Amino acid sequence: MIAAPARLVVRRRGLLTPLLLLLGTSLAAGCWSSANPATGTGGAPAVDSGTSGAGGLPVLTGAGGGGGMLPRASCDEIGSEPIIPEACTTVTATRTVTGGLPSDESTLDTTAIQAAIDGCTAGQAVRLVTDGDKVAFLTGPLFLKAGITLWIDTGVTLFASRNPRDFDARPDQCGLMGGSADCNAVINVNSAPNAAVVGTGTIDGRGGELMIGGTLNWWDQEDADNGNLVAPRLIWVRTGNNFTLFGVTLKNAPKFHVVIERTNGFKVWGITINTPATSPNTDGVDPSASTNGIIAYNKITAGDDNIAIKSSSFPIVDHIVIAHNHFGKGHGMSIGSETNGGVRNVVVCDLSLDGGQNGLRIKSDASRGGLVQQISYTDVCMRGVSNPLVFDSYYSSATGTAIPWFTDINIKNVHNLGAGRLTFRGWDAAHTQALTLDNVVFDSPPTSINASNTALTFGPGPVVNIAPTGATNVTVNRAVTGTDAPRDCTNAWVTF
């Protein structure tokens, strides 16, 4: 890979504002609603590559339907928490739990639970309940129908089978190296709008336990296969418009906890993900090529990205609100590494990150890069984070022609109680990444700053201990006089 020329420019607020025309979409939610105007063809945005806006950026336009524009996402629009619908039936637990494990693994509850789902009327829930000291179910893959809610009640644990054969989407492929479609998830939402998973119970993927028929657990096998293992996700939503995930605790996913793919309208609210930091590829919540999403009031500690917004295909990721969340261990609040489908109009606000590997991060490379724009981070507290700010177009050494470009990135009221390493690496002079920092305070100078091909706008609030002095081929002109107090992080932290 040819090294890009290093260039960093620091500018005052008001410069480098790209022209962004955004498509509006509408959704008729099952458990929640949004009031965005309906325009476009199937809710799909289009890129008019023949025109350009400010700074040479492409203008993003609506496709048909009057070409309406979607306004900037706001953390004020998250609405109220979801409502659990009436149960059409209850299914009682079949086994006890000893030492955190189901007492019996000779049979599965998959057939009984799936029959209840299939027999339920849209708009109602299948409720999994305890029965005395019986508090657990053991299952293979479950498939939700349109409009059906799976309600995991208080005290219930839904354990995933340890047998890879139970999750085969193609014969004898789950647990090997291959494509993700070779392996079903524990809960699958395939083209089933208005489905939901709710309750205060737990889904345990058992990623750290020995697989039946093997000599390793899922996580050890993932390491042995260099991250290429095909393993069950806990929840996998594919074109499941208006999906709701509410209240449940998720843990020990074999690979990824929640994937929401090509879905218009989703809400992830009040869940807890609590999985060891040493578990490989156990992302928390991954929206992919999805639009009109809310991720609010969640607690996430995991072995990979706490949240990762991905866009490897059309439609463009658009209008995602991430509000009032707490992260423990993990790889941070990420966008990427797949950005080739385009990401825009994402807001992150009121976030705490405690002890993770990364803080706020946008990552991509030339094999999967694309335009990432109109992203804002507001009211963020970090402590014990190794890499608090990472905006990196060279996430890997992969080559290609899909060039990453990050612009109109706004970072405001961020307080890092420590130091850490910073990365600001744009692709080249023609794809300079543009970030605004306003009242961004580090209590200690970073241990290193790797910066190139980046335009930083400081102010009007202070920017403390960010200036990349001493970095090679970097020129910084800081002229901030604001006196805002650093964000108060006294009550920002939670326990897992």
Image: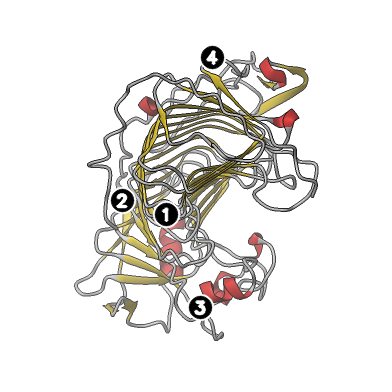
Considering depth in this image, is 474 or 456 the residue closer to the camera?
474
Residue pointed to by mark 1: 356
The type of residue carrying mark 4 is Gly
> Quick check: marks 2 and 3 in contact, CB under 8 Å?
no
Q: CA distance from mark 1 to mark 2?
A: 39 Å
Identify the disc placed on residue 87.
2
Q: CA distance from mark 3 to mark 1?
A: 24 Å
The tally of labels here is: 4
Quadrant in which the C terminus is drawn:
bottom left
Q: Which mark is residue 395?
A: none
Nearest to the eye among marks 4 and 3: give it: 4
Question: Seen from this angle, which residue lies furthest left?
Answer: 132
3D distance between C-alphas at marks 2 and 4: 54 Å
Tell me what residue is drawn at x 32 percent, y 44 percent.
85
CA–CA distance between discs 2 and 3? Answer: 36 Å
Q: Return the disc, 3 or 1, that comes first in the chain's sequence.
A: 3
Q: Earlier in the sequence, mark 2 or mark 4?
A: 4
Q: Name which residue lies at 59% across and 17% down.
A: 17
Mark 1 and mark 2 in contact? Answer it, CB < 8 Å: no
What SS does tag 3 mark? Answer: loop
Query: At numbered mark 4, what does the secondary structure look like: helix, strand or loop?
Result: loop
